[in-house]
Image: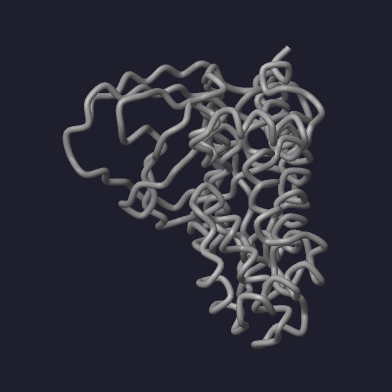
Amino acid sequence: MYFYDTMRRYIETRGGTAAPQFLQLAVDGQLYRLRWVHVTVDEKRCEVRTRRPRGHAHDLYHAVLFTRGAGHFTLHDREAPCQPGTLVLTGPLDSHDFGPTHPGLLEYRELTLAWEAEDGRALRSGWRDVVAWLTGVPVAALNIPPVRHLDLEPFEQVSRHIENVLNVLDARQPGAAFLGALELAALLRLVAAAAVADSAPAETGDSMSARLHRARLRIEQHYRARLAVPALAELAGLSEGHFHRRFRALFGIAPHAYQQRLRLDAARVLLRSSALSCKEIAAQVGYDDPALFSRLFHRRFGQAPGACRR
């Protein structure tokens, strides 16, 4: 692949600026302190796809929010879809490359961190463990996929937190690392809240509620595709009719309506953060008929898709 890489902003903390002690971790009797590595706003354009995508891995943690463009990046040597509002969390040894795998442009904001012991040894636990240790939420209660597609409000919140980290570290004033750490803590609070909301409830096991939560997560992961109700019902261990009734009773919304809400919320994010046409956005979120997309969008938000940009 041939890339044009434009760093729109790049804040490197020479030697790795240590964060305040409230973000340090004690793991197996060893103390690890957070170290800022760099914070960037990056723009990558792919001109020609020449080979299968391959990623790289290291002892670093990345939090990446895609803010412009729609396409695919590389995760674990496979293509993963992204659009404005896609949040990616990779940890040590997670193979990745955030550049586009097909011709096109992707812009993203990136936090790169490390947790290191006094002797330089790097922490290699995953994000799920890190978030659990820092927030006090039990690991079993967290569902943190490496790729999450955010709705408009959390997208704007995460984007603002990363922008604030950029600004305070760029200022290089006393206390900048502390202010940056506060923004990181606020970002991780959002991640933990979303992870708990997506996780099956405490009585997990193979309970009915747990199976329905898994079905809902399947819809969220594949909301662009045609809804395969038989497969969802099988995942929940129910007949199709019983699945519809139990899903609505638990979540207050029918499966098709839930998918439609996910699609329209994703479309609103794209309308406010990309230059794609309404027709392109309709196709991006799963609608082949732009007219149907416009009617459904107006019904949900009270305005036409085009008016959402004004």
Question: For the point 79% across and 65% down, which residue is it?
Answer: 251
Q: Is residue 266 left or right of residue 249?
A: left
Q: Position of residue 60 (x, y in %)?
A: 48, 49
Q: Position of residue 125 (x, y in %)?
A: 53, 64
Q: Is residue 258 left or right of residue 39?
A: right
Is 259 rendered above or below residue 133? above
- Can I make out residue 13 in this image? no
User: In the figure, residue 102 lies in which quadrant?
Assistant: top left
- The residue most toward the left is 50
Q: Position of residue 169 (x, y in %)?
A: 67, 26
Question: For the point 51% across and 16% down, which residue is it?
Answer: 8
Quadrant in which the C terminus is drawn: top right
Quadrant in which the N terminus is drawn: top left
Q: Nearer the viewer, residue 61 or 244?
A: 244
Question: For the point 36% across and 44% down, which residue is it?
Answer: 74
- The residue most toward the top is 310
Question: For the point 62% across and 58% down, which residue is it?
Answer: 32
Q: Nearer the viewer, residue 247 or 133?
A: 247
Q: Is residue 252 left or right of residue 164?
A: right
Q: Position of residue 76 (x, y in %)?
A: 36, 55
Q: Is residue 58 left or right of residue 91?
A: left
Is 278 rendered above or below residue 215? above
- Can I make out residue 155 in this image? yes
